[in-house]
Image: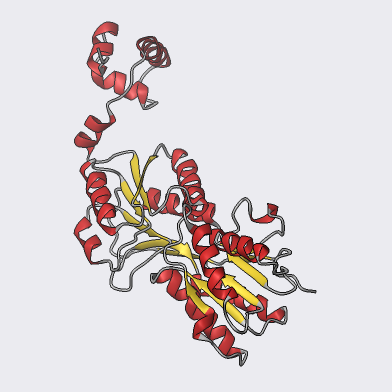
Amino acid sequence: MNVRLKDIAADLGVSVVTVSRALHNRPDISKETKVRILDRVRELDYRPNLAARSLVTGRSSLIGLIVPDLVHPFFGEIAKGLSSTLRETNYFVTVASSESDPRLEQIEIEHMLARHLGGLVLASCQESGESLRKIGAGVCLVLIDRRFRNLDSNFVGVNDYRVGELATEHLVAQGCRRIAHIRGPANSVGNNRAEAYRDTLQRHGITVCDEYIISAGEASGCDGETRGHRAMEAILKLKQRPDGLFCFNDTVAVGAMFKAFEAGVSIPNELAIVGCGNFHYSGKLQIPLTSVDQHAIEIGKRTARMIARLHGKPSNHNRNVILEPQLIIRASSHLR
């Protein structure tokens, strides 16, 4: 049988309000009464009914997080930063994966909203933000990583144009002149990185060859290496192979490197490679991978702080936090 506040109050001969004040560490009850109540709470193993509380107060301590892939290290690190920081303010995270399927994402959103959560954090795989308009002004929505031109929303992410610029500039600085790009999906992240790749090459007077741009699609944690492997197979078939390669993320870069090793390609002497994400294993590979750090854990932390500030406080304008990426140079691209 579940123990209720009124059961504890009746047992100790105090009011329900007094028990509630003790649980919330309010100063307007005596120390002796508070100790007596908390001791009894522990003895009875009382657990508050958070669902009932949220219905009464209109606020919940649960924050929903929906990402395209739970296996991918990038989203795992975001979840870690989000959860650890929210915990400091007595909020907690419930997580779901859309599996990069817009239809499944919409189902997960509806399930989250039905729980009357305190906020929703979303790395969306939708083609546009139209469906997200239905979420409504009463829900604290924060988009992470991906954003939409047709949707004005709170957002926390990295400067993806700068990601592509840093990676490509580095390869040019290493003397590479035939630089390929294994690009990501046609969303804000993939498009901005690919645009920066093209712009940087043109700025240096290097011809942008369409055959040097290979799409890896969504490239999730589960199949990123496979997609990178497949993309490298296409690169190896080119009449004039590239001498530099910028990969959309580190999982794709790892798959591409493995295929290059199989084909006897010397990295970085014949092919310099740069990834993105700076995942925990990137520096521990046979040839440590140069990567652009997106500060995934910091994205999670900043998102948590934004939710804490916005929760229960109506705002007439949305907030945006754009982090600057950092290039981490390792042996996969360092030619000098």
Task: Using the rendered image of the protein, determine whether residue 28 is visible from the camera's viewpoint.
Answer: no
Side of 212 relative to 5 (left or right): right
- Residue sitting at the far bottom: 205
Where residue 71 sits: x, y (%)? 47, 48
Name the residue: 66% across, 85% down.
Answer: 177
Q: Is residue 2 above or below residue 287?
A: above
Where residue 180 sits: x, y (%)? 57, 78
**Closest to the observer, 206 or 296:** 206
Say which quarter of the image contains residue 247: bottom right
Side of 277 relative to 273 (left or right): left
Name the residue: 23% across, 42% down.
Answer: 116
Side of 322 relative to 132 (left or right): right
Where residue 208 sits: x, y (%)? 54, 87
Name the residue: 33% across, 17% down.
Answer: 46
Q: Is residue 217 above or below residue 87?
A: below
Say which quarter of the image contains residue 68: bottom left
Figure quadrant of the C terminus = bottom right
Task: Using the rendered image of the protein, determine whether residue 140 is visible from the camera's viewpoint.
Answer: yes
Name the residue: 33% across, 69% down.
Answer: 148
Where residue 223 sits: x, y (%)? 47, 56
**Closest to the observer, 136 or 207:** 207
Q: Is residue 117 above or below residue 215?
A: above
- Residue sitting at the far right: 336
**Closest to the observer, 72 or 227:** 227
Figure quadrant of the N terminus = top left
